[in-house]
Image: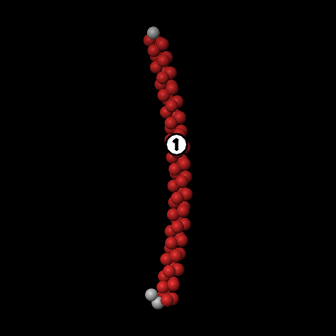
Amino acid sequence: MAITALLLNYRGFASMDSRFASLESTVNSRFGSVEHRLDMLQADMKDLNKAVTALEIDVALVKDKIGL
């Protein structure tokens, strides 16, 4: 009887272990996707910053030409 209980208990833990491994894989995949999106967002923000800086320079030049 005790051996049967131990075997059933082991199966239960093995099942939980596989579930945790599956959950861990899913979470890692999602975080990888989020990390990729954040990298893309960071690159876009750098490009935006460059564009805004160039625009500010152009506006300053225009203001100088018209005397503002």
Q: Which residue is drawn at 50% across and 38% down?
A: 24
Q: How many labels does the image show?
A: 1
- In this rendering, the answer to whether 11 lies above or below 35 is above
Q: Residue at x 54, y 48 (%)?
A: 33
**Quadrant location, the C terminus:** bottom left
Residue 60: x %, y % from top left: 48, 82
Front in this rendered view, residue 13 or 45: 45
Q: Residues within 10 Å of mark 1 (few under 14, many from 20)?
A: few
Helix, strand or loop at label 1? It is: helix
Q: Which residue is drawn at 55% across and 57% down?
A: 40
Amino acid at circle 1: Asn
**Quadrant location, the N terminus:** top left
Residue 2: x %, y % from top left: 44, 11
Front in this rendered view, residue 8 or 58: 58
Scheme by which the image is coloured:
secondary structure
- In this rendering, the answer to whether 19 lies above or below 50 is above
Residue 66: x %, y % from top left: 49, 89
The outermost residue toward the top is: 1
Q: Mark 1 points at which residue?
A: 28
Q: Which residue is drawn at 53% across and 38% down?
A: 25
- In this rendering, the answer to whether 13 lies above or below 46 is above
